[in-house]
Amino acid sequence: MTLVAQNLTPKQKALAINLDPTIYGTFAEIGAGQETVRHFFRAGGASGTIAKAMSAYDKDFSDAIYGKEPKNRYVTQNRLRKMLRYEVSLVEERISREKNPNSKFFSYANTVTTINFDKTLAGHGWVGIRFQGAYNQDYNEIVIHIKFKENDATLQQETLGKLGVNLIYGAFYYSDNPRKLIASLYDDIPLVNLEIDMIDFSGPDFEYVDNRLMSLQLVKSGMTEAVIFSPEGNNMLPADLLYKKNIFAVRGSFRPVTLVNTDMFVNGLEMFMKDVDCSEDEVEVLFEITIANLRAAGDIDERDFLDRVDVLSKLGYNVMISNFSEYYRLIDYFAGYTNRHIGIAMGVNNLLDVFDENYYNNLSGGILEAFGKIFRKDMRVYLYPYKDPETHELWTSDNLKVNENLKDLYKYFKKNRRIVDILAYNPDYSEIYSREILQSITKNESGWEDKLPEGVAEMIKERGMFGYKDEVTLQEFK
């Protein structure tokens, strides 16, 4: 008989921490009671672990401890990090290292808001831990942002308590395996109860951890639907970036980014800004890659993933990784953050997919339900033309052929400018095809370099991206 390993319960994890004489620290929880520390008190043996447990629930009292927050926003990453660092400084100040030479100090904190009485705000929060991996080591930090899915404040509090225990246990026992640590955050918590849409690791134990790969893990595992990185490679909270903003997005494989992609982006964005009468500073721009695209060749190749993101980052773009294979889900996601305008730049082939009824078999309302989400009044498709490599015919919205039963709908969206052509495209780029470029890169052929944005070819060659091998490497390979 094969024995299946069982995950530890929150009580077992809390007890394991309590029985470790080297782990010692504080708990500071704001907004949802003291749900995490409660597990440690109930597990037994907490006197050797808990230096202090507090809940500075009153804002004035909290301000007196941690300082005031800009715009009186308390459920923020900045507030959480202030709490973590302040509490650790108190432990260092008040606990003698001479009497506790082997102790690994920590501070756990959360600042959250649970669902409101009218159930109009679902609740969210920041949860984190600052801890030492070894007694003589600098501190590490793990910070996560959560969104509650349960429809009851008491249930959300219980979920928060379990999450806190999982985070603390993971920090001390799984820090050498961040992927396992991330997966363990959902021990004893159903995936449908909680969303983790941002995670950040820092400190000596995580020196070689790429937070973009950790965010990718969140999407792959279904813990969230989308993550966003800045050009500097930092994880960004979608709500902070997109809330009440105009949004312009370009979807693609970007393997690699070509002049077609940038031409589509630049000219589509210019049309979008003119249509909605705004400046570039008033628009959040995203280059989006779907998990389905990353998995196109089987399992996700993390090197290939980072190659795509690094090139886009070099060009100065925010990158979004999502689970939204269908466009209606992407638009619906954006609409959850903003009531302003949404623009999507896409090629002809992508628009043909939008008008393919087979994509919507999972919707009870079928393609009509999807169109209701896609072609909302503040959303517009900016269509980039496509030249057929065999017939050399140029396809635009005027000669695009959709199914007979959808022609009237298509004409309606076109007439009402829900679909508009990008007219200022560069015809010299019309025969640039990313698949051909990728083949040339992997075969070490010449002539592909001038079909990419400035500096990208050099980056690909210098770092051996997308399967590129220079002559020396090829000779060694042979």
Image (spheres, rainbow, N blue to C red):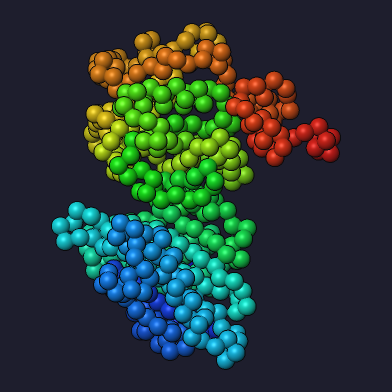
At 40% across and 83% down in the image, what residue appears? 52
Q: Is residue 309 left or right of residue 121?
A: right
Instruction: Report if residue 355 is visible in the image.
Output: no
Residue shown at 43% from the left, 84% from the top: 50
Q: Position of residue 111 (x, y in %)?
A: 34, 66
Place of residue 212 in the rendered image (x, y in percent of width and height, measured from the top left): 53, 50
Q: Quadrant of the C terminus?
A: top right
The image shows residue 9 at horizontal and vertical percentages of 41, 74
What count of labels does the image hold? 0
In this rendering, would 318 be left or right of 148? right
Query: Which residue occupies the foreground of this view, 5 or 122?
Result: 122
In the rendered view, tell whether residue 84 sits above or below residue 295.
below
Left or right relative to 475: residue 314: left
Tell me if residue 318 can be seen: yes
Residue 344, image quadrant:
top left
**Quarter residue 279 falls in:** top left
Q: Nearer the viewer, residue 406 or 328?
A: 328
